[in-house]
Image (cartoon, grey):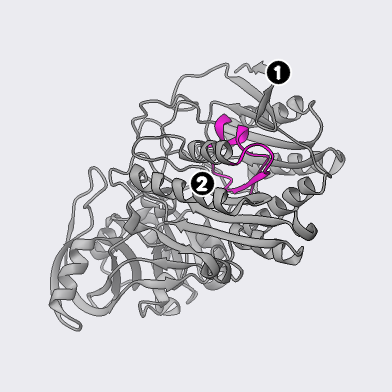
């Protein structure tokens, strides 16, 4: 390091890829930022990358910005575009020759050819820079963490909360560990434990069995100075890979006896598996509850089956159709992904009546819904998210049109799936949130964080590929409980130091 100033390359390639969404995610769907603009944007955003950059600046390190590439969760990433980004990141690393590399990844990216995109990316980066350059990654706790990812990195840390209120802290911790490595204070050993199961429900960390498991992991971290971090991964349920499962990664300082610790965490998932269930309300009951409300505060209905934040297309009209059938004149606003209808609205013009068949263009089994309304708003769909989750981040819905139906229902038609967990999706299009009886978001958890006390949340059981129910999705490669009859799963434990797999200490067979 020149003059003892650490030179750290930072980058982000963030996407959560739903393997059951038939529409590939292409370059046009991503927000791409580089150089000084990356640093300026990230330092004011509620993101893991922002946490990394601010912490580096705070510690007097030199920030070397590479590339930020982000898109809302959606279908598998176009492989050629993935290869372009990977080549650019590798090229930047070879050109700048940084002392360390800090990356924000989601951890559940797949391409049209690869199930484990991040594992491939990280291996290519490691092969390029060698093992003398520390590589740290900050991940979403819904990552599909793999051996390839852990083997290619020195620091592998996830956020700990769902909704993700601690992503900035995740980035800060990755940087602290990287700088400790450069100072000779940390010799990392990563232990990965994984069990072939998913969480069918109860995925929030503030309560229930998941809260208890995270509390247990935090207590272990506090009690043992050799442990620098324990990250618990609730695997993304829409990844069709052969090795998906609940996992934990224990990061220790020069300590190779953490197999039992990692195993004890994932074993708790199996022990508590009967408690992982959601309590969802039907669309009809949700709207009836809205109609019966006594306060003026609107409800926010989470369209669980069509969650864009789980990679669904956002093209469901199920809640809209149910609202139109009611005779109580409920006021509401909801987004629908439909580029063809947006184009027709633009051709028709503002303040003009229009009849459209909206939605149902991508999700298998969905059909369009015929509606008639008035075009009340047109925009380019470029917004900045309010946060706190991803606050300050730019987001693009593509050309957007708002259709008002029966003078009470505002349908936000977007060209791209919208990050509707954030109020900016509505307010940017002229929707007065406080004036609504209900809003529909394509999110299951993060909307609670971003809407806060502005609205009352309801989780709604709805159709689509954004919510797991046993037997509802056709997995070709993945094998896990409860989708498959696994009665005595094996907890697989692997340990890595400096890219080298250490002898396996433990493989545990659990009984039903």
Tell me, yes or no, whether the two marked residues, 1 and 2, touch with CB atoms within 8 Å.
Answer: no
> Which numbered disc, 1 or 2, marks the residue that appears first in the sequence?
2
Identify the disc placed on residue 340.
none
25 vs 370, nearest the viewer: 25
Q: Is residue 141 on the magenta stretch?
A: yes
Identified at 48% across, 27% down, the residue is 482
307 vs 457, nearest the viewer: 307
Identified at 40% across, 35% down, the residue is 114
Identified at 43% across, 27% down, the residue is 478
Q: Is residue 82 above or below residue 5?
A: above
Q: In the rendered image, which quarter is residue 2 located in?
A: bottom right
Q: What stretch of residues is rendered in magenta?
A: 129-158
254 vs 193, nearest the viewer: 254
Q: In the rendered image, which quarter is residue 395 located in?
A: bottom left
Label 1: element kind: loop
Q: Position of residue 312 (x, y in %)?
A: 36, 49
36 vs 329, nearest the viewer: 36
> Marks 1/2: CA distance?
30 Å
Left or right of 334 in this view: 357: left
Q: Is residue 347 on the magenta stretch?
A: no
Q: Is residue 262 above or below residue 344?
A: above
- In the rendered image, the residue lying farthest to the bottom is 351
Label 2: element kind: helix
Q: Which residue is mark 2?
A: 90
Q: Position of residue 417 (x, y in %)?
A: 34, 59
Q: In the rendered image, which quarter is residue 54 located in?
A: bottom right
Is residue 159 visible in the rendered image? The answer is no
Q: Position of residue 272 (x, y in %)?
A: 63, 32
Q: Which residue is mark 1?
A: 503
Q: Position of residue 216 (x, y in %)?
A: 75, 39
Q: Nearer the viewer, mark 1 or mark 2?
A: 2
Picture mark count = 2
């Amino acid at each position: 390091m020149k003059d003892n100033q650490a030179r750290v390359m930072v980058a982000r390639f963030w996407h959560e890829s739903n393997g059951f969404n038939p529409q590939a995610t292409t370059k046009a769907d991503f927000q791409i930022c580089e150089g000084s603009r990356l640093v300026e944007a990230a330092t004011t955003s509620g993101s893991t990358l922002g946490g990394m950059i601010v912490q580096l600046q705070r510690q007097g390190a030199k920030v070397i910005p590479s590339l930020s590439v982000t898109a809302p969760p959606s279908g598998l990433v176009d492989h050629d575009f993935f290869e372009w980004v990977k080549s650019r990141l590798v090229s930047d690393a070879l050109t700048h020759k940084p002392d360390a590399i800090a990356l924000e990844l989601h951890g559940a990216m797949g391409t049209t050819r690869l199930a484990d995109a991040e594992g491939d990316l990280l291996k290519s980066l490691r092969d390029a820079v060698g093992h003398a350059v520390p590589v740290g990654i900050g991940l979403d706790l819904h990552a599909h963490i793999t051996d390839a990812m852990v083997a290619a990195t020195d620091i592998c840390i996830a956020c700990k909360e769902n909704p993700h209120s601690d992503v900035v802290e995740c980035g800060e911790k990755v940087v602290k560990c990287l700088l400790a490595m450069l100072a000779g204070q940390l010799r990392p050993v990563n232990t990965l434990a994984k069990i072939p199961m998913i969480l069918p429900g109860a995925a929030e960390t503030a309560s229930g069995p998941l809260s208890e498991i995270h509390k247990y992991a935090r207590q272990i971290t506090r009690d043992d100075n050799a442990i620098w971090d324990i990250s618990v991964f609730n695997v993304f349920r829409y990844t069709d890979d052969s090795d998906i499962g609940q996992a934990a990664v224990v990061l220790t300082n020069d300590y190779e006896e953490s197999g039992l610790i990692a195993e004890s965490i994932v074993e708790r998932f199996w022990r508590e598996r009967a408690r992982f269930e959601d309590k969802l309300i039907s669309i009809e009951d949700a709207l009836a509850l809205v109609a019966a409300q006594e306060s003026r505060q609107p409800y926010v209905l989470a369209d669980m089956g069509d969650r864009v934040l789980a990679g669904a297309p956002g093209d469901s009209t199920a809640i809209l159709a149910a609202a139109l059938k009611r005779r109580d004149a409920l006021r509401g606003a909801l987004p629908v992904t439909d580029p063809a209808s947006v184009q027709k609205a633009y051709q028709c013009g503002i303040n003009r009546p229009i009849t459209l068949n909206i939605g149902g263009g991508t999700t298998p089994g969905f059909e369009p819904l015929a509606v008639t309304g008035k075009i009340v708003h047109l925009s380019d769909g470029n917004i900045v998210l309010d946060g706190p989750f991803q606050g300050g981040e730019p987001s693009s819905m593509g050309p957007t049109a708002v259709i008002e139906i029966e003078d009470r229902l505002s349908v936000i038609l977007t060209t791209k799936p919208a990050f509707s967990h954030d109020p900016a999706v509505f307010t940017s299009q002229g929707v007065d949130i406080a004036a609504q009886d209900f809003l529909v978001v394509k999110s299951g958890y993060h909307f609670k964080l971003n809407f806060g006390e502005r609205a009352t949340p309801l989780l709604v059981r709805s159709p689509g590929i954004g919510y797991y129910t046993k037997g509802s999705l056709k997995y070709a490669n993945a094998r896990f409980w409860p989708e498959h009859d696994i009665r005595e799963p094996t907890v697989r434990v692997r340990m890595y130091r400096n890219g080298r797999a250490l002898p396996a200490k433990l493989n545990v067979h659990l009984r039903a």
